[in-house]
Amino acid sequence: LLSMKYETHSLEEFQNIAKEFVVAVSPKEEVATVVGLYGNLGAGKTTFTKALANVLGIEETVTSPTFVLEKFYELKNQKFDLLVHIDAYRIEKPQELVSLGFEKVISDPKNLVLIEWPEKIEEIMPSHIKVMIESIEQGEGRSVVIDLT
């Protein structure tokens, strides 16, 4: 199972994709599982994160950490202990993320780390699962491609 492709037209369908994703992904032995969320502004990166958080049992409202850069959500009875949501959109230098403890976050195998705008921190981005989200059908739907390699 290396690549999963979907078309989605509703939040419910995003949830189903998130469920399959959670089943397909397992913690690594030595480092965090890092997921890069790729897509234009408004493509659905935060929507995907919200769906994933929901599937993982997070009850608090998940919003994009555009200004705080990163948010942490504790997980209970899951494969991972922590969901870390990072939004690199406003980052000008990857060093900004490093000073927030990025190395520690990505070195813990119990962390599932979702990064919006990973292309902004390309030089410090570890090997990661790629989730590409694009608008299709005049913005009514989304194409979601998950590359697990």
Image (cartoon, grey):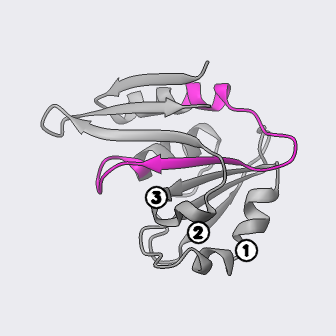
Most foreground residue, 143 or 77? 143
Residue 71 appears left or right of 7: right
> Which residue does the numbered mark 2 point to in the structure image?
70
- Secondary element under disc 1, as helix, strand or loop, is loop
Q: What residue do we see at 48% from left, 26% from top?
A: 16
In this picture, is 118 found above or below 133?
Answer: below
Residue 101's tag is: 1
Whole-percent x, y for residue 13 in the image:
39, 27
N-terminal of the two: label 2 or label 1?
2
Count the labels in the image.
Answer: 3
Q: Read off the magenta span.
A: 19-45
Residue of label 3: 119
Q: Residue furthest right?
A: 29
Q: Is residue 145 left or right of residue 101?
A: left
- Indicate the quadrant containing the C terminus: top left, top right, bottom left or bottom right: top right
- Return the residue nearer the eye: 65 or 75: 65
Q: Judging from the image, what secondary structure is the residue with disc 3 in? A: helix
Figure check: 17 above or below 69: above
Q: Amino acid at mark 2?
A: Glu
Query: Which label's residue is closer to the chain start, 3 or 2?
Result: 2
Residue at horizontal 41 percent and vertical 49 percent from the top: 45
- Vertical placement of 119 versus 48: above or below? below
Instruction: Answer with left or right where residue 39 lies relative to residue 82.
Output: left
Q: Residue at x 46, y 65 (%)?
A: 120
Mark 2: secondary structure: strand
Side of 107 relative to 91 (left or right): right
Nearest to viewer (mark 2 / mark 1): 1
As measured in the structure, the alpha-carbon distance from the residue carrying label 1 to the one carrying label 3 is 19 Å
